[in-house]
Amino acid sequence: MKELLEMTEEAFFKAMRKGWANGDPGREILRPPGYPTWKMIEYTVYSLGITVTDRWGDIVEDDGRVRPGGSIIASLHTIPVWGMQCTRGQKYAKEALPLLRKVLMEAYHGNKFYGGRGKQNVLSEDGKLLYVNNCSGSFEKFTADESIVFLPTNTCIGSHFWVGGLLI
């Protein structure tokens, strides 16, 4: 089991370094009428036999509110073995995206697992934005509650709450 966990974590970091945080726009997944349009990135670590699929998009609630949706699944051959799911949050404002991408890429390049997201507190270069990630657990079982705050007005301009871990 330890070997599978280590292989899956290695595949996760390799995939995430090539994904959304690195600027990959993904491709649209066709959905039935009434469902949101999602983007998808799939990356296969052939030497390990693990496929990592990253899906994200906006979910429109019945009351018209838009919330983020996303999931990352790692499969060994065709069997899902690990996953993470965005269960709630607020869509990130455009001005938050460069900081979000930066903190994610720093974690992914350093092979540091903070609930699949960035390290706990990161201030933008201009000092106006603060990325916060309250995470707990390990790659095996975790939560990550992240947000970006616009400091001059102390306003949250995006947030995600993630849960995940081993599925077997």
Image (cartoon, rainbow, N blue to C red):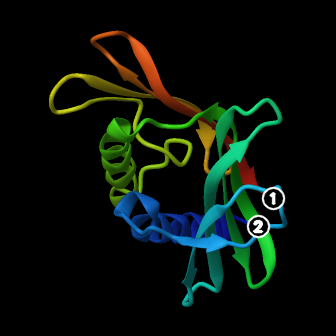
Q: CA distance from mark 1 to mark 2?
A: 5 Å
Q: Nearer the viewer, residue 48 or 102?
A: 102
Disc 2 crowd rating (10 Å Cα; few below 14, some 14-19, many 20+) is some
Q: Position of residue 3 (x, y in %)?
A: 64, 71
Q: Secondary structure at mark 1?
A: loop
- What residue is at 35 percent from the left and 54 percent from the top? 105
* Label located before the other in sequence (1 or 2): 2
> Is 30 left or right of 58, judged from the image as shown?
right
Say which residue label 2 marks.
81
Q: Above or below — where is 11 with respect to 134?
A: below
Residue type marked 2: Val
Marker count (numbered): 2
Residue at image mark 1: 167
Picture layout, residue 163 above or below residue 159: below
Q: Residue 16's x, y, as percent?
A: 47, 64
Asked where in the image residue 54 lies, by quadrant, the reply is bottom right
Relative to 133, say whether 38 is above or below. below
Question: Tag 1: Cα neighbours inside 10 Å, few (<14), some, or many (≥20)?
Answer: some
Query: Observer-nearest residue: 69 or 35?
Result: 35
**Rendering quarter of residue 135:** top right
The reply to whether discs 1 and 2 touch (Cβ–Cβ < 8 Å) is: yes
Q: Amino acid at mark 1?
A: Leu
Instruction: Farthest residue to the bottom: give it.
Output: 47
Image quarter in which the N terminus is found: bottom right
Residue placed at 54% from the left, 90% from the top?
47
Q: Residue at x 72, y 74 (%)?
A: 75
- Residue 88's disc number: none
Residue 86: image location, x then y, percent:
67, 44
Residue 146 lies left or right of residue 122; in this view the side is right
Q: Residue furthest toward the top?
A: 153
